[in-house]
Image (spheres, rainbow, N blue to C red):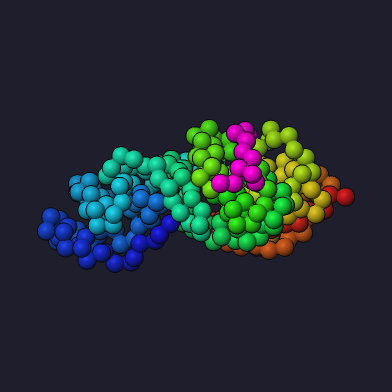
Amino acid sequence: MKRGTQVIKPRIREILSRELPPELVNLLPKHWVRIGDVLIIPLRKELEPYKHRIAEVYAKVLGVKTVLRKGRISGEFRETNYELLYGSDTVTVHVENGIKYKLDVARIMFSPANVKERVRMAKVARPGETVVDMFAGIGHLSLPMAVHGGAKVIAIEKSPYTFKFLVENIELNGVWDRMTAYNIDNRDFPGENIADRVLMGYVVRTHEFIPKALSIAKDGAVIHYHNTVPERLMPEEPFKTFKETAREYGVEAEKLNELVIKRYAPGVWHVVVDIRVFKR
Ligand SMILES: C[S@@+](CC[C@H](N)C(=O)[O-])C[C@H]1O[C@@H](n2cnc3c(N)ncnc32)[C@H](O)[C@@H]1O
């Protein structure tokens, strides 16, 4: 994923200043996100009448096949909601940290702000350990752990559409020997006391899944617990809720590390806490 620059590209400015009213030229997008050969741009409403031509010029100058207008990520499956401005094919292969991620950018979230976590997970994984990724997506976090960390990963993804890409990505990255994929709700996953590491890469409602994560984890396992937290409840949350829930299930929890991933909404942060659990 590449973040665009903070200035309008001279070539884009040159072409569009011949076609747009002068006062609109400075409103052209100065930054964008490129996922594979799909570009995502924010677009001011003043530019609405020119949106398709603007997208065409950005596509040609930046060398992409499709341009989408930035939308929101929402719902249980964390699906995106973009406006197609140029091109038609929104499926692409994005390469990051030596990993190939095939996805439909128009429907599946791939957050630039989560790149540090994808790279960090590649480093924390240990060869041969068993990782259960409860919210696998297209393999955002589990592929780096299998490819670079040599971990054995069980990847669970509920959405059938996203699961199709998860399976293709396991194939594309040649890690079928280390990864198993389940197209189920993680609450129906039968494994208990099997994971050295559990990934809970989800937001907003992640606390509802703590009991399941505890049952999947071995004694002494590490759980990477993500959630969104209002700033006024930090730094106690999100660990406080995890620890209290774990106690109800007779499990002790120790906070090892905590990182802020990104701003989720005004006054709300996406946070990850690394937690060791003791089940004796
Ligand atoms: C936001 S994506 C996150 C991907 C990755 N874990 C990351 O952090 O970058 C969350 C994924 O969890 C899936 N999901 C939501 N609820 C689930 C459940 N109960 N069981 C399995 N997968 C679920 C969604 O369909 C979505 O693909």
Q: Which residues are magenta?
A: 174-185
Which residue sits furthest right? 280
In this rendered view, identify the residue nearer to me: 213 or 43. Answer: 213
Estimate the x, y position of residue 200 in percent, counting from the top left. Answer: 64, 48
- Is 165 a magenta residue? no
Estimate the x, y position of residue 30 in percent, counting from the top left. Answer: 30, 62
Vertical placement of residue 248 versus 24, above or below: above
Q: Which residue: 51% across, 59% down? A: 97
In this rendered view, identify the residue nearer to me: 230 or 270. Answer: 270
Estimate the x, y position of residue 159 in percent, counting from the top left. Answer: 54, 35
Q: Quadrant of residue 249?
A: top right
Q: Is residue 74 visible?
A: no
Relative side of 278 to 95, left or right:
right
Would you say the magenta stretch is mainly helix, strand or loop?
loop
Q: Which residue: 22% across, 46% down? A: 52
Quadrant the N terminus occupies: bottom left
Q: Is residue 257 visible?
A: yes
In this rendered view, identify the residue nearer to me: 18 or 160. Answer: 160
Relative side of 55 to 36, left or right:
left
Estimate the x, y position of residue 74 in percent, counting from the top left. Answer: 48, 42
Q: Which residue: 48% across, 50% down? A: 100
